[in-house]
Image (cartoon, rainbow, N blue to C red):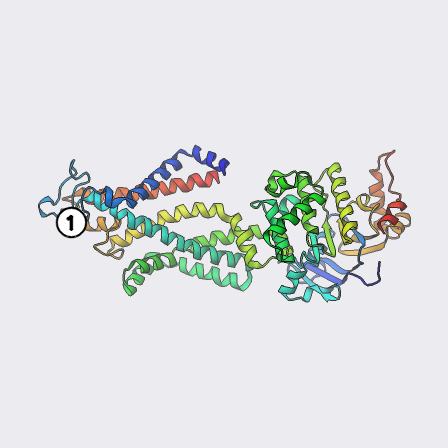
């Protein structure tokens, strides 16, 4: 891990509706850095602005939302001030996004394969044939059984677990430096949740990419993230190494979240205690 | 696709409408072969013949066979209708998609233009246009196309506005795709089903409009025939020969009704 941050969010402020009055600010004074190869978990309760952050990074915020202040640097370039053509080059090629609801993030009228080849052809300049081959490889490496059949399937023909893995395949297609995963497992049951997470984790190591993992479930990510940032009402209240957060949470909100997660721990299952082996392996 | 087909088959009226329109098209296509008489030949000693086995729909005041004229006239009525509807759909879809996708000032300008055009009685615009430029086929297409795209634009804009907020369109933006590709490959295909329904409805409207224009003498000019112009020919002798206006009138009504049935069936099954 070098000291040069990959992404740096500086004093971001996002406002919904009309003037930048305090009650309309969804995100304010938001600061965050992500380093190369790092997994950063952004954790907060529903409605605290996690998804807004994800969308702000890729400049997806439309009316009635507006970024009213702040800068987002990606390798020194301010994403918020980039001209459209340069932004298009960075989108997906450098920073990819996995949506919460894979069913909604895929075009229902197009087969899965062409949706992925479209990206490969656009960003890597591949021809039709090699893009199709690459897509099959990607689908296989994301653990989709019968990749060839998935290639020609419409999104509604796949199960939600398969759709999310297809999304993951799509996200790694151009080997981006950063993947933002916006509650990627919220729509899945526990079994598929684990599968999708394992798949994401494996590919992250294989491709050495950074991951901004957004979730409300601290238990989901604690064993895997290098650092955890706790968010409350549009602000970071505490950002520390996972070890620190779990062992010595400072902020009352962090403690509250941890307690909430622990309350659901079933006796006999692994507790939230950090697994040192997996962290060192990941680092 | 096959699912849609099965649902369509259950719409009995729509099927009837489809058969009717298809047969009109075939009849129009093969009109020169099928017409029992020369539709343009004037036979002085056969004027004002009531429908009889020799002239199934009678003859007009010049002794021309109405059935033959109907068949030939369907060519103009249907082809003009199709082309005009296509033009209207093209203009309306493009402007509606641009307005919906980009929003802001562009949207405001386009939609106020739509409001303005909708607040003119279309028939006056048409009359002025034809009076100004003459009634050639191209002018008719242009004038009618330019005055019937507005509701298409409104529909497409509304569809795009709601699609735009869906995740897969957001995703298309995150993928780094160009606006044009997003509009044509991701937005418009998803707005297709209401457009198909609207196509059938517009086609009925345009055929009616063409008939009114021809009736006013502003449509296709003689010797070309359309259903509207046959009615216009028979208008003055209605008391003496009811069959001249009745059969083309029936053709217009049936066609418009069939198209409405098709639209209704498509709306239910798409």
Decide: is B120 above or below B28: below
Residue at the spot 8% in from the left edge and 45% down from the top edge: B45
> In screen coordinates, is A193 left or right of B220?
right
Relative image position of residue B180 (x, y in whole percent):
54, 58
> In screen coordinates, is A66 left or right of A37?
left
- Residue B182 vs residue A208, the one in the foreground: A208
> In screen coordinates, is A243 left or right of B38?
right
* Chain bearing mark 1: B
Question: Which residue in the rendered view is the most extreme toward the left?
Answer: B45
Q: How many marks?
A: 1
Relative image position of residue A153 (x, y in whole percent):
60, 41
- Residue A168 vs residue A65, the one in the foreground: A168
Does residue B133 appear in this view?
Answer: yes
Does residue A61 appear in this view?
Answer: no
Residue at the spot 75% in from the left edge and 44% down from the top edge: A199
Relative image position of residue A182 (x, y in whole percent):
72, 49
Report the residue marked by disc 1: B41
Question: Which residue in the rendered view is the most extreme toward the right?
Answer: A248
Indicate the secondary structure of the residue bearing disc 1: loop
Decide: is A156 above or below B231: above
Decide: is A139 above or below A124: above
Residue at the spot 32% in from the left edge and 57% down from the top edge: B123
Q: Quadrant of residue B36?
A: top left
Relative image position of residue A10 (x, y in whole percent):
77, 63
- Residue A186 vs residue A181, the one in the foreground: A181
10 Å crowding of disc 1: few (<14), some (14-19), many (20+): few
- Residue B134 vs residue A2, the one in the foreground: A2
> In screen coordinates, is B38 left or right of B97?
left
């Amino acid at each position: 891990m070098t000291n040069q941050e990959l992404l740096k969010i500086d004093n971001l402020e996002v406002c919904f509706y009309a003037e930048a009055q305090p009650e309309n600010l969804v995100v304010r004074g938001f600061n965050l850095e992500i380093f190369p190869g790092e997994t950063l978990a952004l954790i907060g309760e529903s409605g605290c602005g996690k998804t807004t952050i994800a969308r702000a990074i890729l400049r997806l915020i439309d009316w009635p939302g507006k970024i009213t202040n702040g800068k987002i640097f990606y390798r020194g370039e301010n994403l918020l001030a980039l001209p459209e053509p340069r932004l298009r080059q960075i989108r997906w090629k450098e920073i990819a996004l996995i949506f919460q609801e894979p069913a909604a993030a895929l075009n229902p009228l197009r087969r899965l394969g062409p949706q992925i080849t479209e990206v490969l052809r656009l960003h890597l300049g591949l021809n039709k044939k090699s893009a199709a081959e690459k897509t099959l490889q990607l689908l296989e490496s994301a653990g989709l059984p019968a990749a060839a059949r998935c290639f020609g399937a419409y999104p509604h023909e796949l199960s939600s677990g398969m759709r999310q893995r297809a999304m993951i395949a799509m996200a790694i297609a151009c080997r981006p430096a950063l993947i933002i995963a916006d509650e990627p497992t919220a729509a899945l049951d526990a079994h598929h949740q684990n599968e999708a997470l394992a798949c994401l984790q494996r590919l992250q190591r294989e491709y050495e990419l950074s991951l901004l993992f957004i979730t409300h479930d601290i238990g989901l990510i604690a064993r895997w993230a290098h650092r955890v940032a706790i968010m409350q009402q549009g602000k970071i209240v505490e950002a520390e190494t996972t070890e620190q957060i779990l062992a010595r949470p400072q902020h009352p909100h962090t403690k509250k979240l941890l307690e909430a997660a622990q309350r659901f721990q079933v006796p006999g299952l692994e507790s939230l205690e950090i697994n040192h082996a997996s962290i060192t392996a990941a680092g | 696709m096959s699912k849609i087909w099965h649902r369509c088959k259950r719409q009995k009226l729509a099927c009837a409408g489809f058969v009717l329109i298809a047969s009109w098209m075939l009849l129009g296509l093969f009109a020169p072969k099928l017409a029992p008489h020369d539709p343009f030949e004037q036979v002085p000693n056969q004027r004002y013949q009531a429908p009889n086995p020799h002239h199934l729909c009678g003859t007009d005041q010049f002794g021309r066979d109405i059935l033959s004229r109907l068949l030939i006239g369907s060519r103009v009525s249907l082809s003009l209708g199709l082309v005009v509807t296509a033009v209207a759909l093209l203009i309306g879809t493009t402007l509606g998609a641009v307005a919906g996708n980009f929003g802001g000032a562009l949207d405001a300008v386009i939609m106020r233009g739509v409001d303005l055009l909708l607040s003119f009685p279309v028939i006056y615009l048409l009359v002025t246009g034809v009076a100004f430029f003459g009634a050639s086929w191209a002018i008719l297409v242009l004038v009618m196309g330019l005055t019937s795209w507005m509701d298409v634009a409104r529909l497409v804009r509304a569809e795009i506005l709601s699609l735009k907020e869906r995740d897969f369109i957001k995703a298309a933006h995150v993928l780094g795709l160009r606006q044009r590709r997003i509009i044509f490959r991701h937005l418009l295909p998803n707005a297709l089903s209401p457009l198909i329904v609207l196509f059938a409805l517009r086609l009925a409207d345009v055929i009616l409009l063409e008939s009114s224009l021809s009736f006013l003498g502003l449509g296709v000019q003689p010797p070309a025939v359309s259903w509207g112009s046959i009615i216009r020919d028979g208008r003055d002798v209605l008391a003496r020969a009811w069959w001249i206006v009745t059969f083309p009138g029936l053709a217009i009504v049936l066609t418009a009704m069939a198209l409405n049935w098709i639209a209704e069936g498509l709306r239910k099954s798409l």
